[in-house]
Image (tube, helix red, strand yellow):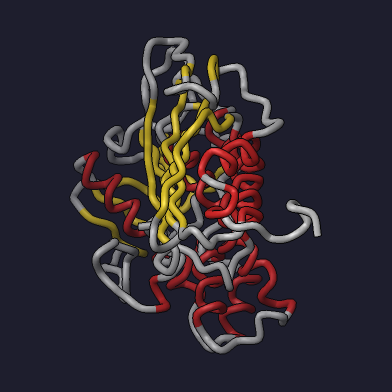
């Protein structure tokens, strides 16, 4: 049996051998002036600034290898970071990745994770400029994302005003539904669950819905939906010093209702508090014709907090890292 025809481990191949294998043949984007191979990468900052965000995924807490393929885990790691950069109004330009893993991890697992990362990085418009590989007791992935504002002001959570339209781009509730399927005793081979499982394993942030609408008609405030719609709108409302009222009828999804019926639950909770969809939620001046991909779901009003049809929401509102434990928390971003 040849050396490369069996599943060799990271311990056998060694740190630098693995790095050589996962970086070989990769073509950097135009913003990366110097990629892997030196002490640090060099990334262009055309307007003199970076938007920077970082996130960490820990095996057993944020993902499971028996629930998701390594390529899916890699895509998810990049997507949740790219969404944070885009939610500031920036185009992703580069990512740096730190990986920790046990020595007996097959190199093919890291290669597949890296393949997934590159696929999503390129979908977002960037490339992977470098990173680090270390020994750890479990698989850990840490990603730092860089974005280019292109001379524009960043779009923060703090610009919403009373009367603004609240709108979303992207899917809501489907990742939470996928987590519910994986966490329970449902038959994951049932075709009715396919879309939910795919959404949980590989989120699809609608990057173009933000980066293609820069200009005078852009949102007044913006966030990505990672912790749950109500939670993230709450962050936006707090930063802007306003209240938000969500229209429940604008969030109905018959296809998601069918998944919920199969699990004997209510899809509304996934939509309002499920999290990890990595959709975008923003506010727009009253009377604005929303750009393609955006749909209205509520209105900004004076006050504080988030309501649904004028009433305080029942049930959970989203995720917080140090609340909750057990299988239900696996797969959640924070």
Q: Compared with residue 224, is residue 230 higher up or lower down, i.e. above or below? A: below
Residue 134, relative to residue 48: is it above or below? Answer: below
Which residue is at 49% across, 58% downward? 103
For this rendering, which residue is in front, 126 or 320? 126
Residue 237 x %, y %: 26, 46
Q: Quadrant of the C terminus?
A: bottom left
Most foreground residue, 242 or 97: 97
Residue 20, by quadrant, is top right
| Figure check: 49 above or below 255 | above
Residue displayed at 34% across by 64% down: 318
Q: Which residue is at a point 74% across and 52% down the rendered structure image?
A: 3
193 with respect to 145 (left or right): right
Residue 205 appears in the picture as rendered: yes
Q: Is residue 126 left or right of residue 310?
A: right
Q: At x 53% / y 62%, what residue is drawn?
A: 104
Residue 228 placement, left or right of 75: left
* Horizontal and vertical percent position of residue 206: 58, 43
Identify the image quadrant of the N terminus: bottom right
Within the image, what quadrant is residue 105 found in?
bottom right
Q: How many circles with numbers are drawn on the protein?
A: 0
Judge by depth and name the residue closer to the eye, 270 or 144. 144
Q: Residue furthest right?
A: 1
For this view, does 37 lie left or right of residue 237?
right
In the displayed structure, would residue 197 be above or below residue 17?
below
Q: Is residue 292 among the parts visible in the rendering?
A: no
Q: Position of residue 296 (x, y in %)?
A: 50, 48
């Amino acid at each position: 049996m040849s050396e490369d025809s069996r599943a060799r481990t990271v311990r056998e191949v060694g740190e630098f051998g693995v790095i050589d294998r996962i970086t070989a043949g990769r073509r950097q984007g135009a913003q990366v002036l110097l990629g892997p191979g030196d002490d640090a990468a060099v990334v262009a900052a055309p307007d003199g600034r970076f938007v920077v965000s970082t996130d960490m995924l820990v095996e057993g807490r944020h993902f499971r290898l028996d629930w998701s393929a390594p390529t899916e885990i890699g895509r998810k790691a990049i997507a949740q970071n790219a969404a944070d950069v885009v939610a500031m109004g920036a185009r992703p330009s580069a990512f740096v990745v730190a990986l920790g893993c046990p020595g007996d991890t097959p190199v093919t697992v890291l290669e597949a994770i890296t393949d997934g990362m590159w696929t999503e990085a390129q979908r977002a418009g960037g490339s992977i400029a470098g990173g680090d590989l270390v020994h750890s007791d479990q698989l850990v992935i840490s990603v730092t994302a860089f974005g280019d504002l292109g001379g524009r002001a960043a779009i923060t959570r703090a610009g919403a005003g009373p009367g603004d339209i609240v709108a979303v781009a992207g899917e809501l509730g489907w990742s939470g539904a996928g987590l519910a399927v994986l966490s329970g005793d449902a038959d994951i081979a049932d075709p009715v669950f396919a879309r939910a499982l795919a959404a949980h394993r590989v989120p699809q942030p609608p990057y173009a819905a933000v980066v293609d609408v820069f200009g005078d008609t852009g949102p007044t405030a913006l966030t990505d939906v990672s912790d749950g719609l109500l939670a993230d709108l709450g962050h936006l409302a707090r930063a802007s010093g306003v209240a938000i009222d969500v229209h429940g009828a604008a969030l109905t999804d018959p296809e998601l209702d069918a998944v919920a019926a199969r699990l004997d639950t209510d899809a509304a909770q996934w939509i309002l508090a499920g999290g990890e969809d990595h959709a975008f939620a923003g506010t727009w001046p009253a009377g604005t014709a929303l750009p393609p991909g955006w749909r209205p779901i509520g209105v900004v009003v004076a006050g504080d907090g988030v309501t649904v049809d004028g009433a305080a929401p029942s049930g959970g509102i989203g995720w917080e890292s140090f609340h909750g434990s057990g299988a239900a928390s696996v797969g959640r971003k924070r």
